[in-house]
Image (tube, rainbow, N blue to C red):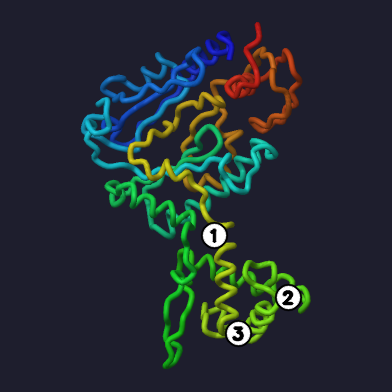
Amino acid sequence: MEERTRAYLRGRFGDHYRRTAVTLPPDAHEREWGYIPWTASPGETMVRHESLLNLGDLESFLARERPRHVYFSAGRYADPSASSMAAKDWRGSDVVFDLDADHLPSVDPAEATYAEMLAACKDALLRLLDFLENDFGFEDLTVVFSGGRGYHVHVRDDRIQQLEREARREIVDYVRGIGLDPDGLVTTKMRGNVTARALKTEGGWGKRVHESLLAFVDEIESLSDEEAMARLQELDGIGEGRAKTVYGAIEANHRAIEDGNLEAGGPGIRKLVEALTSEVVDTQHAPIDEPVTTDTNRLIRLPGSLHGGSGLAVRRIDRDAIEHFDPLVDAVPETFEGHDIAIEVTDPGEVELAGDSFTLSEGDSIVPEYLGVFLMSRGRAEKGPE
């Protein structure tokens, strides 16, 4: 990045902070703060081990320093500005979840557009929220667009603040479906005078597997015999012989399957549930970044700040607004709207932003400032002369 580009972005970030109110997180004075300045040196240097006592009024600090990135800690401390973690005297931490489009198994960053990656990441976010709200019953959730490639969820329920790393790793394993054993989804129920094994259909992974089982059975029953046999053999561990057994069990025990009964149909239905469990984990888990959630001292982006790698706002999202939230429209800062600037495009191509599509050629161009800031922040353009 050229010095003229860096100076321009730093100046405009400062203009943004002078006109934008930033809401502090709870217990802000007990948190560690950090930021990355606009420096000419290769890479990025984090300034951390700061407290609000050191920084002063946050809005004044942001307008004065005009940082490239701003962070605060998930943890709360007696002395957040101490230079070592031990000296900070940890008091508790939010549980933070990070979804990054680059790390989604369903996304190929080399093939997908930025908009497609973000859309896939929002799907993963909705799955994560289903786990957090319905499986764990968490209520104090803050959902944030990271300003870059994904989303953060901050959980601040009092009952989880003291969880250590290993307990947080168990939450990670659950929402990612790591080590999920089909036998753990099974309970016993009385069927008349007989004890029978049945899926736990009330909630959690058991409910997800049961819903998948019902959908799969409906699909099989809509197919011809030949098509049904072929479809069954697409599942892991089910060959031709096992497929015949499963197919017969489905035809004879539809009502029992609706009830989650694994005894009706013998080993055929149980084998089907085992195969579908693997598919359900693959398609319905939340692919969160484990180190973020397990780290009680993690620094995370400040909602309301700007992301120095995109020029987009780190935007808090109301729970009922997530479905319709479009980061490439709703996270475009108003500061950068309403006028054009000159840039030199170094990485041409198509860009979707603020509801418009742009096809950019290499060389000098006049573009809306929000687009120019986006391109310069991402290293795809330099500031041109006005």
Residue 253: which numbered mark, if any? 3
**Which amino acid type is marked by label 1?**
Val
Going from the N terminus, do you reach mark 1 or mark 3 first? 3
Q: In which image quadrant can residue 107 be found?
A: top right
Query: Which SS class for mark 1?
Result: helix
Query: Which SS class for mark 3?
Result: loop
**Residues under labels 1 and 3: Cα distance?**
25 Å
**Residue depth check, mark 1 versus mark 3: number of the one nearer the observer:** 1
Looking at the image, the residue that sits furthest to the top is 385
**Which amino acid type is marked by label 2?**
Met
The residue sitting at 65% across, 6% down in the picture is: 385
Please tell me how crowded label 1 is: few (under 14), some (14-19), or many (20+) other residues with Cα within 10 Å.
some
Q: Position of residue 328 (x, y in %)?
A: 61, 34
**Residues under labels 2 and 1: Cα distance?**
23 Å
Residue 281: which numbered mark, if any? 1
Going from the N terminus, do you reach mark 2 or mark 3 first? 2
**Residue depth check, mark 2 versus mark 3: number of the one nearer the observer:** 2
Q: Position of residue 48 (x, y in %)?
A: 35, 24
**Residues under labels 2 and 3: Cα distance?**
17 Å
Could you say which is closer to the camera, residue 290 or residue 52?
290
- 58 sits left or right of 80 in the view: right
Please tell me how crowded label 2 is: few (under 14), some (14-19), or many (20+) other residues with Cα within 10 Å.
many
Q: Is residue 292 above or below residue 63?
A: below
Q: Is residue 288 above or below residue 37?
A: below
Q: Position of residue 159 (x, y in %)?
A: 29, 52
The residue sitting at 52% across, 45% down in the picture is: 321
Q: Quadrant of the N terminus?
A: top right
Looking at the image, the residue that sits furthest to the bottom is 193
Disc 2, disc 3: CB below 8 Å? no
Circle 2 is placed at which residue position?
229
